[in-house]
Image (spheres, grey):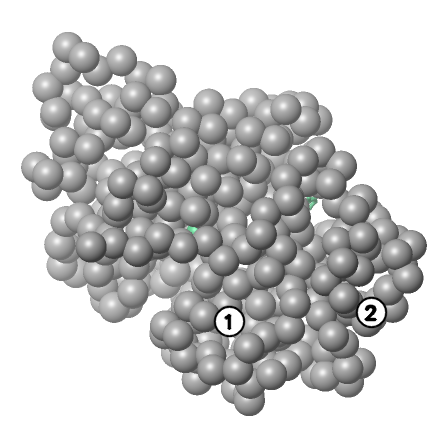
Amino acid sequence: MFTFNISSNIYFGSGVSKDTGRIAADLGLEKVLCIYDPGIKAAGIADHIISSLEASGLTCSEYGAVIPNPDEASIEEAAEAARSTQVDGIVAVGGGSSIDTAKAVNILLTNPSPIRQYEGSDLVCHNTKPLIAIPTTAGTASEATDFTVVTDLVRKKKMVIHGKNCSADIALLDPVLTKKLPPNVTAFTGMDALTHAIEAFLSKAASPISDHHALKGISFIYQNLEQAVKNGDEVEVRSNMMLGSLFAGFAFNSAVLGLVHAIAHPLSAHCGLPHGLANAAVLPYVLSYNAGNASARKKYRQIAAAMGIETAQDSDEEAASRVIKAVAELCKKVKIPPLRETGVAKEDFETIAIDALNEHSFQFNPRKANVQDVMAILKQAY
Ligand SMILES: NC(=O)c1ccc[n+]([C@@H]2O[C@H](COP(=O)([O-])OP(=O)(O)OC[C@H]3O[C@@H](n4cnc5c(N)ncnc54)[C@H](O)[C@@H]3O)[C@@H](O)[C@H]2O)c1
Ligand SMILES: [Zn+2]
């Protein structure tokens, strides 16, 4: 038995963000809150979206103070902005931090605060208002998933809020918006998307449908990320990255993730690492660890094929090591720093390892691990 679900309607294409106003008006919206962060404003993207909304006759208020790895206080502040302006819908524009903030705000518009009570699955009872999500990274795929991630600063934990009423109604993907994404953010967010696809494919909850999307995601991302980092202006490459990220999102929305994300969440919560960097720094070493499980190892041959790597003459072990090597080389090419250069201290390893084993996504990892195993992975990634 398996389930597969995509909640958002997808609009995809170069220039489609110009239609934001028309799409919002078609939903019956008149007064919206536009949610973004200062980087999106500086890149001129927030103004571009607001112009489209206003040109279609909508009234826009703005919340432009989204923070990376958004915490509860920032969600509450943004929710207050939404309540005080009595909006009938939300437009999120930005990376995962902006879209997740918007999803959490939307929950709090029709459900009581605090947001922490919804950590877990299907705990948001009341229907939410229409939400349009416009991603500017490729990326988290938050525009198409039923997850929102909010940091609990007290427990130092990234809370995952999942299920009904946790998605955007419309995912509006315009690759042109990612042209100005700086190389390091392109690399981090692209490695996050690659991790989503690989972890969904190796997940215990994988299905034939999620596998199909995961392998498509791996192909698009692996074959375009280096170019996207080096030549960010090429719209076709950006478009392929955005498609890859979306396919990966389709896959992990149902298949969930694994040990890479289980380690990345405490790395961000304790040490403040950007989400994609935290994933990328440990991905090759978790892949190597998971290849120690014989049934997981058999699946690496299909990952290799999706990457364009020939393995017909190889044993399972050789095919797996080709995948691990290729991912490690990609990390080098797109300049993913080792953990020691990211502000993580070795003294943090034990806490991070203990927390990783309590992460929801760990349950779906194909190989069991203990604290020592995770500490060994962190040492390798250091
Ligand atoms: N909901 C989900 O399914 C899901 C999945 C994975 C990750 N996440 C969460 O998403 C967050 C990370 O999101 P992210 O990696 O997209 O990064 P982000 O949203 O934090 O953005 C990173 C930086 O890039 C800048 N930026 C984004 N797009 C830009 C553009 N086009 N041009 C110029 N600058 C741009 C932003 O201003 C910001 O400074 C984390 O909190 C993570 O936990 C959510
Ligand atoms: Zn992720």
Rendered position, 258 above or below 290:
below
Q: Position of residue 225 (x, y in %)?
A: 51, 29
Which residue is painted at 56% across and 23% down in the image? 227
Which residue is painted at 64% across and 44% down in the image? 11
Which residue is painted at 50% across and 58% down in the image? 7
Q: Position of residue 243 (x, y in %)?
A: 53, 35
Q: Is residue 178 at least partly visible in the picture?
A: no
- Pick the residue in front: 349 or 143: 143
Indicate left or right for 15 with 1 as reference. right
Q: Is residue 202 at least partly visible in the picture?
A: yes
Quarter holding the N terminus? bottom left
Task: Tell me how far mark 1 sits from mark 2, CA to CA.
Answer: 21 Å
Indicate left or right for 250 with 312 as reference. right
Query: N-terminal of the two: label 1 or label 2?
Result: 2
Q: Residues within 10 Å of mark 1 (few under 14, many from 20)?
A: many
Q: Which residue is mark 2?
A: 30
Indicate left or right for 96 with 164 as reference. right
Rendered position, 76 above or below 47:
below
Rendered position, 367 above or below 75:
above
Tag 1 near tag 2, CB within 8 Å: no
Question: What type is the residue that disc 2 sits on?
Answer: Glu
Disc 2 Cβ-to-ligand 1 distance below 8 Å: no
Q: Which residue is mark 1?
A: 165
Q: Position of residue 235 (x, y in %)?
A: 68, 27
Disc 1 Cβ-to-ligand 1 distance below 8 Å: no
Quarter holding the C terminus? top left
Q: Residues within 10 Å of mark 2 (few under 14, many from 20)?
A: some
Q: Which mark is residue 205?
A: none
Question: What type is the residue that disc 1 sits on?
Answer: Asn
